[in-house]
Image: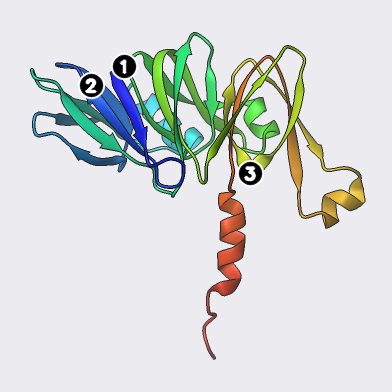
Amino acid sequence: MDIDIQFRPSYSLAVVKLAPSERVRADSGAMVSHSAGVEVETKAEGGLLKSLGRAVLGGESFFQNFWKAGPQGGEVTLAPDLPGDITCITMSGTSLLIQSGSYLASEDGIDISGKLSGKAFLSGEGFSMLEATGSGKILVSSYGAIYEKELSSGERYIVDTTHLVAFDGNIGVTTKSVGGLKSTFLSGEGLVVELTGPGRIYMQTRSPQALISWIIPQVPSKSS
């Protein structure tokens, strides 16, 4: 599978080239276009309970689409819901925790499941996130551009909880406030998460929550 990400970082599009009979799994609604020889199969991958876990715990679609190339190979293009970036992560054994809504697509060698996680709670993502395991390529998306940071062993790094897209499963996670009590309430920063390496983290340069907070006051209220 060959993946070319175009139009980064604002309106990214993943162009996925499939070998003969190769397939890619993508979240529902992610497909933009595909070549004529590509066929789609929609199913609850892993059975009822696993699909329900992805939907309830990971915020993803209950059904997954599998795009399979014909004897001549094929092409599928994929894009996320929000304007922003896509990055391709090559996994080789280390698990990856992904925020709700950021999973886009993956190869057959990657298993996706919803997971109740203390790290999810500590990172501000509720009690659950999507967990990706296995080996192969996975595509994650963001609102805004994606900034990648590699942490060395024992290195600590602070991230606003609303900007965290994904991180390696072996990274340590601790939630903390910004400065003292006064700063926490008056700085407008809220809670942050302290991540401890080794491992890689992926952050988005814009916050969907900040966008929602800006839009709501602009919506006209009903006149009496």
Residue 44 seen from this side: no
Q: Residue 173: image x %, image y %? A: 71, 25
Q: Measuring 30% from the left and 43% from the top, which residue is drawn there?
A: 29
Q: Is mark 3 on a helix, strand or loop?
A: helix
Residue 80 seen from this side: yes
Name the residue nearer the viewer: 52 or 43: 43
Q: With 210 as the anchor, is 80 left or right in this view? A: left
- Determine which residue is flagged by label 2: 23
The reply to whether dot 2 and dot 1 touch (C-beta < 8 Å) is: yes
Q: Residues within 10 Å of mark 1 (few under 14, many from 20)?
A: some
Q: With 10 as the anchor, is 129 left or right in this view? A: right
- Determine which residue is flagged by label 1: 108
- Determine which residue is flagged by label 3: 162
Q: Measuring 76% from the left and 49% from the top, which residue is drawn there?
A: 189
Q: With 16 as the anchor, is 191 left or right in this view? A: right
Name the residue nearer the viewer: 53 or 176: 176
Q: What amino acid type is highlighted by mark number 2? A: Arg
